[in-house]
Image (spheres, helix red, strand yellow):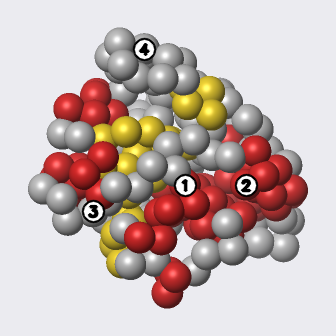
Amino acid sequence: LVRCVAIRSAGSVFNIYAVANGSIQLGFGQEDLVAEAFLKKDTRGGSGLRTVALMHKSPIGIMVRKASGITNLSEIRKGVVNKGNRGSGIYANATAVLKAMDLEDKDLAGVTFMPPVEFEKAFCEGRVDVIFNALAHPSQLYSRLRACGGEFLDIPPDIMAKMMKNNPWIRPMEIAAGMYDPEQREVKT
């Protein structure tokens, strides 16, 4: 008999290191972050990690409020960007994209660090212009964000190449056209 208890955590990065240091026995984490931690044998016990199962592909979703006037990734500096809570995969993804773009927090109009439960409301109320996430598709969260004026942004090939150079477990993916509604185009991510 194996007893499992779900606990709320900061997200993928927190879970990976909580497993590595023995605080928890099993945790969910993004594939690329687990692989990176495993290979960093000097990093908080990462060499003791093992993958139990790959649950689903989770393309990085970058969504912008259409009302912000931002139409491509190079324009996100004009908006308030939510990087996700520290310790989460969202934060790791946002950091990877911004690093590949040679952008720092100070280069953006504003930065927040909210988890999905908070950033959804802030996005729909117009307090956040850009959000990052990585979910299996279709996702109810993305449906709700599109319903309140959200549009996916592509990750351009040059930024993707830089991201893959920085982390070889990242690979190009697409969000299929029409996944959320007939007007939604294919998204390169």
Check disc 3 and give the amino acid type.
Val
Identify the residue under disc 2: 159
**Residue 166 pos. (x, y %):** 82, 61
Q: Nearer the viewer, residue 87 or 120?
A: 120
Identify the residue under disc 1: 73
Tell me if 140 is positioned left or right of 40 in this view.
left
Residues at marks 2 and 3, CA–CA distance in whole angstroms? 23 Å
Dot in front, 3 or 1: 1
The count of marks equals 4
Q: Nearer the viewer, residue 84 or 70?
A: 70
Q: Secondary structure at mark 4?
A: loop
Q: Secondary structure at mark 1?
A: helix
Q: Nearer the viewer, residue 89 or 38?
A: 89
Identify the residue under disc 4: 178
Q: Of the residues under marks 2 and 3, which one precedes in the sequence?
A: 3
The residue carrying pointer 1 sits among few (fewer than 14), some (14 to 19) or many (20 or more) residues within 10 Å by Cα, namely: many
The numbered dot on residue 128 is 3
**Residue 44 pos. (x, y %):** 71, 72
Q: Secondary structure at mark 3?
A: loop
